[in-house]
Image: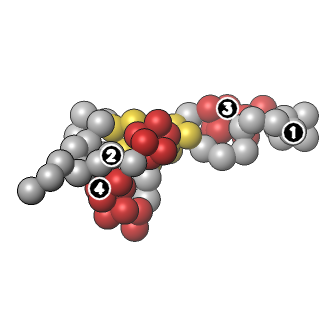
Amino acid sequence: MPKLKTRKCAAKRLKQTGTGKFRHHKAGARHLKTCKNAKRKRRLRQDAAVSASENSRIKAALPYGL
């Protein structure tokens, strides 16, 4: 059985927690910040958990974890 390849696009965008869950950066924090209030910009700084429906796709993209 050959080794499985890691999807590099997923490996660069996701982090794995100690319990095995995956975290990602939130969208919308790069530009056009003047129209967003401070509370919204603070929340965009934090990582978010990957939804449960995406977990199977991520497990296939990262066969050996991170």
Q: Name the residue tied to disc 2.
A: 6
Give the position of the N terminus as an image quadrant.
bottom left
Q: Residues within 10 Å of mark 3 (few under 14, many from 20)?
A: few
Amino acid on which the number 4 mark rests in the picture: Lys
Q: In front: mark 2 or mark 3?
A: 2
Image depth: mark 2 or mark 1 in front: 2
* Amino acid found under the numbered disc labelled 1: Leu
SS for callout 1? loop
Q: Rounded to the nearest whole Å, what is the CA distance between mark 2 and mark 3? A: 32 Å
Amino acid at the residue labelled 3: Arg
For the C terminus, the image quarter is top left
Give the Cα distance between marks 2 and 1: 34 Å
Q: Which residue is mark 4?
A: 59
Sequence-wise, the earlier of marks 2 and 3 is 2
Q: What residue is shown with label 3?
A: 42
Residue situated furthest front in the rendering: 2
Mark found first going from the N terminus, 1 or 3: 1
Check the image and report above or below for 45 versus 50. Answer: above
Q: Residue at x 17, y 48 (%)?
A: 3
Answer whether residue 20 is visible to the viewer in this image: no
Q: Does label 4 or label 2 sit earlier along the sequence?
A: 2
The answer to whether the residue labelled 2 contacts the one labelled 1, judged by CB atoms less than 8 Å apart, is no
Q: How far is mark 4 from mark 3, CA to CA?
A: 30 Å
Tell me where residue 17 appears, x and y as whole percent. Answer: 31, 36
First in sequence, mark 1 or 4: give its number. Answer: 1
Q: Which mark is residue 32?
A: 1
Say which amino acid is labelled 2. Answer: Thr
Q: Earlier in the sequence, mark 2 or mark 1?
A: 2
